[in-house]
Image (spheres, grey):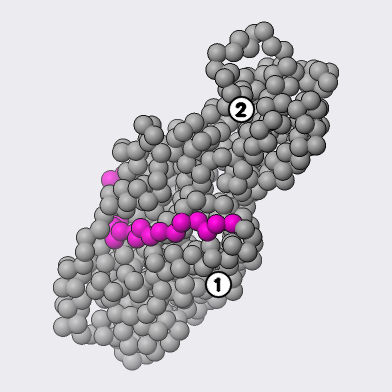
Amino acid sequence: MRSKVDAIPSIAPALRERLITVYPYIVEGAAHLDFAELETHEIIRELAQSCAATQKHSTAWLLLVAIAGNFPTADDVLELLGRLSVSGVEGAYLAVLEGTLPLAANSRFLNVGIDILDKTTVVDVNFTAQNGLNTGVQRVIRQTMTRWNNTFDHQLVVWTDNGKAMRLLTDREKQRVLEWDSSMRFELSEMGDEQITRIAIPWRSKVIVPEVAIHGVIPAMSALAAYSGNQLALVGHDAIPVLSPEDVLPEESERFAHFLSVVKYATDIVCVSHSAAKEFSGFGQTLSSQGLQSPRVDVVPLPAGKITRENNIHTRLKRKKPELPLVLNVGSQEPRKNQTSILVAADLLWREGLDFELIFIGSGSPPLSTAFDLSVESLQKRGLPVSVMRHASDSELAEAYEEATLSVFVSLHEGFGLPVAESLAHDTPVVTSDFGSVAEIASDGGCLTVNPRDPEDIAAAMRELLTNTQLRTQLLHDISRRPVRTWDDYASELWEKLGGVSQND
């Protein structure tokens, strides 16, 4: 069988390095072995025999990574263990070659080296590191990681473009996570798979995933969660794509449904609100039907932090009628955010003769934002002071919060509702929904809650805040008495709840 290895001589040095690297993690008592005395095929034979003898999912997973340079899928792991079960120790070498060479044949990373991330905390910041977008989830991750970076031992990783392996971050990707500013908001990662020389392998580690995985990495991530021997913990933001599929693109629902194959093997899910925790707990309760144990679900609520103005960004908020009171909505324009109901409510008030300016700040993409965009255009043609800012800097956002008389956020389904917390942090009263996570935020004061499905109810609350000085004064007083909760608090509590691994463990 040696000829099967020799048939691919171009990858032999990298293959040998990977095999030697994983050897002490698979074969007991191999720490001081002299590999110079062993041929590559002999190393594979000993690794194969050890895996056959122990029948461990984790060592089979690691051997597949070493030979193919790829993270395997769950089917890959189970197929290899099935072969080893049939072959026994004596036939293990042949079983491994037959089971792994097809996987290696489709690998882009046969020439890469590997770094074992052993007994550490590995944090997957894939989308946030590789994209400059800075909406709700990315904002939470960046605020958290900048604090973890100064306090806790951990290693940031991203996934390769093909979703088959993890790697360490480039310097620019680290900057996108730890030193983000608005100048980066249109950036994409500069690192392609063809440039990768090393991949990173978590081993006996806690892998933390603070964002929903992109579709391409889910098969490998699911196998990592189920079979690698690592513990995988998640930050639970919401289950909106499967609970409110009518309000998202079909591909988002499909992606999240597949992501549940990762969720069900997680050890811990720490949610950003009690509302989100109910969603994930409900899913966890269904797992007993598959013979699986529910992940431990806990809650660390997000803080109410101010948006920081950026020293290197000098753009100013552009208003149509700066002399008028400002009504602000922050959030991506999509059906579940319910901005069309805000437009209807605002139109009712404009027809009554109330004067105010309405600004929407957030991203939007067809087809989700099409109906909203048409409604805005119709109001603008009537000369009404309504505008949409799709690419606002943090400085412009901070200025908008500070100038706003009130903020309106009447979403139909949220995991948390960061714009509500941010508005309150800037001493801006809020009109928000009377249920779910935003009602949790509102319960500490500074908000009027409404039925978000009733534009007249929304209009009534807006009218009160625009005309009732006494009510506005009371809400501002309530805001001043809200419990103070910072990003430092959140980052520290999240690390504790997720059970990050310290170097002393």
Q: Which residues are magenta?
A: 292-314
Tell me the tag on residue 484: none
Give yes or no for residue 144 being in the magenta stretch.
no
Residue 98 or residue 171, whichever sits in front: 98
Q: Which residue is mark 2?
A: 26
**Is residue 357 at all visible to an observer of this figure?**
no
Left or right: 114 in relation to 299? right
Tell me the tag on residue 244: 1
Residue 427 in picture, x, y percent from top left: 22, 67
What residue type is disc 1 on? Ser
Tag in front: 1 or 2: 2
Q: From what the image shows, is residue 294 above or below residue 98? A: below
Q: From what the image shows, is residue 210 above or below residue 345? A: above
Residue 421 in picture, x, y percent from top left: 31, 65
Q: From what the image shows, is residue 465 above or below residue 334? A: below
Residue 423 in picture, x, y percent from top left: 29, 66
Q: Residue at x 66, y 33 (%)?
A: 54
Residue 476 or residue 99, whichever sits in front: 99
Residue 26 or residue 217, whichever sits in front: 26
Q: Earlier in the sequence, mark 1 or mark 2?
A: 2
Q: Are marks 1 and 2 in contact (CB under 8 Å)?
A: no
What residue type is disc 2 on? Ile
Number of residue marks: 2
**Is residue 342 at all visible to an observer of this figure?**
yes
